[in-house]
Amino acid sequence: MSPHAIIIDTDPGQDDAVAIMLALASPELNVLAVTAVAGNVPLHRTETNARMVVEASGRAEVPVYAGAVRPMLRELVTAEYVHGPTGIDGANLPEPTIELAEGHAVQAIIRHVQESPDPVTICPLGPLTNVALALLLDPSIAENIDQIVLMGGGYFEGGNVTPAAEFNIYVDPHAAHVVFTSGIDIVMLPLDVTHKALVTNTETKRFADIGNRCGAAVAGMIGFYARYDIEKLGSKGAPIHDPNVIAYLLKPELYAGRHCHVEIATDEGPSLGATLVDWWSVTGNEPNALVLHEVDSVGFFELLIDGISRLP
Ligand code: RIB
Ligand code: CA
């Protein structure tokens, strides 16, 4: 079976970095492009971080593009308080020597989807600005996108940036509305599932013990990044959200969920950026997303360790 064509849209972010590494380590996936978007940190950092991670993974041939510098309508909100000033504090990776690929990420998404002989899966790991703009600029690309598998949202778990909203959706709720009303099959990995696979010191040590550069980088990034959630949640571990998107593509059997209608709250106010998941089908609206809720956390971590072990 030919490798699954994907585009990763990302705002590295330590957890994005681990997701990118897992994807680049997996022969089952053909990463057509990595497109950076402003989110966890400003664009000049997310695009640099993306290049650092692609290069450290030994995959310098994968093009990295810079995309939207801010959300469609709202001002950019960043999360250095979680990720540190660089966005991937703890990675201890060298600055990139590979250049940015020519052209804007939005046009790159359109071109790579149009040129792909096989349907493409879009994997957003950050705010949905680039993906929404691509769909608005050329709606016909939906014909060659088989699914959008995204990390974002929260329902029973609520939000992590306001009580109602998860960061990726909150930063650009209007872009999320465009994506969730696009008619493209969506698989949504919200906080409700990512909070069920917490990384603890045990897993962090296992990454360090792999003995390669990427294992050390993952251990360093998780060690830095997890401190925020462990202190905030008072739990023994922290979620690493974004790698769940890639793990789902590699082993969907690790996850379970339900097809639901999801609406994005875009009005200013306390609910802005909420993902209104109709879990009990009370609206009668047609489902527009497979909303994942359960994960085999042991299987997830084994997949992650195995993938990172294959990198330089
Ligand atoms: O809320 C978690 C999400 O927001 C993750 O994708 C993290 O990297 C940030 O982008
Ligand atoms: Ca992210």
Image (cartoon, rainbow, N blue to C red):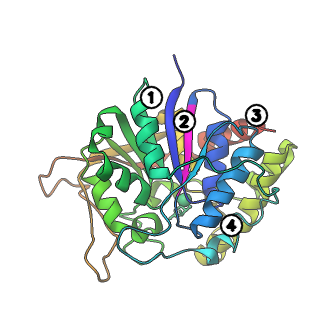
Q: CA distance from mark 2 to mark 4?
A: 28 Å
Quarter that holds the C terminus = top right
Q: Is 33 above or below relative to 238? A: above
Q: Amino acid at mark 4?
A: Tyr
Report if residue 211 is visible in the image.
yes
Q: What secondary structure is marked by label 1?
A: loop
Q: Quadrant of ligand 2?
A: bottom right
Q: Are marks 1 and 2 in contact (CB under 8 Å)?
A: yes
Q: Which mark is residue 310?
A: 3
Q: Position of residue 178 (x, y in %)?
A: 28, 57
Residue 153 placement, left or right of 37? left
Judging by the rendered image, the residue that carries numbered circle 1 is 116
Magenta span contains residue 220: no
Q: CA distance from mark 1 to mark 4?
A: 35 Å
Q: Are marks 1 and 3 in contact (CB under 8 Å)?
A: no
Q: Earlier in the sequence, mark 1 or mark 4?
A: 1
Q: What secondary structure is marked by label 3?
A: loop
Residue 296 placement, left or right of 45? left
Q: Are marks 3 and 4 in contact (CB under 8 Å)?
A: no
Q: Which mark is residue 32?
A: 2
